[in-house]
Image: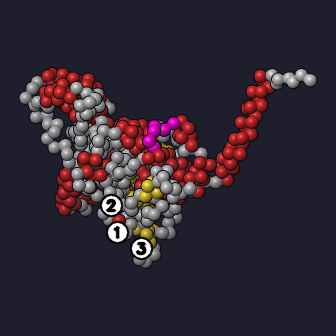
Amino acid sequence: MRRTTPPPKRTRWFRLAAVLLAISPFVAGELYLRATQTVDSSDLADDPILDSSRLTPLFEPSADGKRWEIPDSRRNFFQPASFPIQKPADTRRVFVLGGSTVQGRPYATETAFAKWMELRLQTADLDHHYEVVNCGGVSYASYRVARILGEVLQHAPDAIVIYTGHNEFLEERSYATLSKPPSWFSRMGNQLRLVAAIRQTLRGRPDTEDLPQEVSTRLDQPGGLELYVRDEAWRRAVVEHFAINLRRMVQACQAAGVPLYLCVPTSDCVNTPPIKIQSLPPGEIDRQRFDQAWSRACDGESTDAARLAACKECLAIDPHHAGAHYIAGKLHWDRGNSSLAAEHLIAARDDDVCPLRATTPILQQVEQLGDQPGLTLIRCDHLFDRSDAAGRPLPDGLADPSQFVDHVHPTVNGHQEIGEQLATAFARDFGIAMTEKAMARYREQAERHLATLDETYYARGKQRLEGLRQWASGRAGELSLD
C-alpha cells in the first residue's frame, strides 16, 4: 500500500497550528491578567536587578496620628515634609519625586520648583487647597524613586511629578543580569503581565542584589573617583536599568489613573568640565602621539586655532576622550560658534568617565515616553535653552549656563521657571484659568515668600554648594582654558 506525503502547504499549516497550540496557554494567561489584574503599585518594589523589599517607607504617622511625615532618621537625605492622613475634600495633592534637584539643592525645599508650583496653583485656583509634597532625596536614582512612587500612590495623589536621571551612575551595581544590550525580546518581556507575575513569585531570587536602606555612592568612598573607568558595557546596563524603572513608574501611574508629569532633566555643559577624563590604554592607541597632541590642546599660551587642531588630532586617535571634546567645545563657545560648541560639549558630558549628569541615552529614554497616555513631558531642557553662545535668543541645544549654580542644580530663578511650567501644564489638565489677576497674585505671594527667607538660608546654601564642589572633586585644574 502506497504511503502518501501531505502537501507542503498542509504541513506548514500543521506546524503553525502546533505552535499556536503550544503558546495558547501563555496568551490566555496574559489576557486573563490584563482583564482581571491592575498594576499594583507594590510591584514597584520588584526591581529586576535590585531587591528593595527591605527598604522602610519614607513616610510614617506623626505622634498624634493625624499626619504622614518624613521621620528625623531620613533627614540626611530628605527635607521635612508632611500631609494629613485624612485628605480634606477641597485638597489637591501632588507628590514631587526625584533627587537633589527636586529638593532644591544647594538650597532647600523653600525655593525648589515644587514650592513655586504650589504657590502658582494656589493663587490661580482659589476653590482648592494645594499640597505639593516634596519627596526629593539626595543622590536618589530611578530605582529608589520607583519605590517611593509605589508608596505615595497609596496616599490619594491627584498628580505625580518626577524629575530623575542625573543620579543613575552614582551607586555600585554589578548588573550581572544585564551584561548584554537589551534585545527586542527582553524589552517585550518587560511589558507582559505574565512576566511580572512570575517575577513577583520569584522575588528574592539569588540573582538580585540587596539595595541598602540609604544611598552609598562611589564618591562617598575613599578614592571613590578611581572606581570610575571607561566601561561601556556597564554604562549600557545602567541605561537599560533606568529605562526599565521609568516604564514601571509610568505604568503604575497609568494603572492608578493618576496624571504623571515627567521632567526631562537638564544640566550645564558649558561651564562644567568632565569630572574625570581617561585615555584609552597604550595598547589600543598610539599613546605617545596622543599625549603630545593633548599637551598642545591644554596649552593656554597657544592660539585657539592650534589648540582646536590639537583637539581634532586627539579625537582622531580617541574619539570618546571627554577632555578633548570639552576643550574644543569651550573654544568654539567662546568664539560664538554654538553649533560646533554644542556637538563637543554634549559629547564631553556623555563621555565623562564619572557621569554626574544625565547622558544623551538617559535623556532619550525620558523623551521616548512623551506619547504615553496620562503623561505630560516637561521639557526643562528646552525651557533653559533660550540663547546661543553669543547671547542671541536662539536655542542651540545647550542649556544656558546662567540657569545653574553648578553642574545640574538650577538657580532659584530656574526653579521658579520649572515650577511655573509645571503649574501651567497642571492647570491645563484640570481646567484652571491662569489669568493675569492670578499671575499678579502669584508674584505678590512669591515676593512675600522670598521675604521670609533670611540671610542664613542663602548662607547655608552656599556652604552646601561648596560641599557639592568638593564632593565632585577630581576635575580641578585639569582642563583649564586660561
Q: Is residue 103 visible?
A: no
Q: Amino acid at mark 3?
A: Ser
Asked if residue 181 lies in the magenta stretch, the reply is yes
Q: Amino acid at mark 1?
A: Ser
Q: Which residues are magenta?
A: 178-183
Numbered tag placed on residue 62 in the rendering? 3
Question: For the view shown, which residue lies furthest in the front direction?
Answer: 1
Quadrant of the image containing the C terminus: top left
Q: Residue at x 28, y 47 (%)?
A: 227
Q: Is residue 73 left or right of residue 159?
A: left
Instruction: Name the mark nearer the viewer: 3 or 2.
Output: 2
Q: Earlier in the sequence, mark 3 or mark 2?
A: 3
Provide residue 68's location: percent of width, then percent of height. Answer: 44, 68
Query: Which residue is at the front of the view, 450 or 255?
Result: 255
Quadrant of the image containing the N terminus: top right
- Label 3 and label 2: CA atoms lie apart by 19 Å
Q: Is residue 135 left or right of residue 303?
A: right
Dot 1 alpha-carbon crowd within 10 angstroms: few under 14, some 14 to 19, many 20 or more: few
Q: Is residue 197 visible?
A: yes
Query: Which residue is at the front of the view, 202 or 346?
Result: 202
Q: Earlier in the sequence, mark 1 or mark 3?
A: 3
Label 1, on which residue? 73
Asked if residue 56 lies in the magenta stretch, the reply is no
Q: Residue at x 74, y 31 (%)?
A: 15
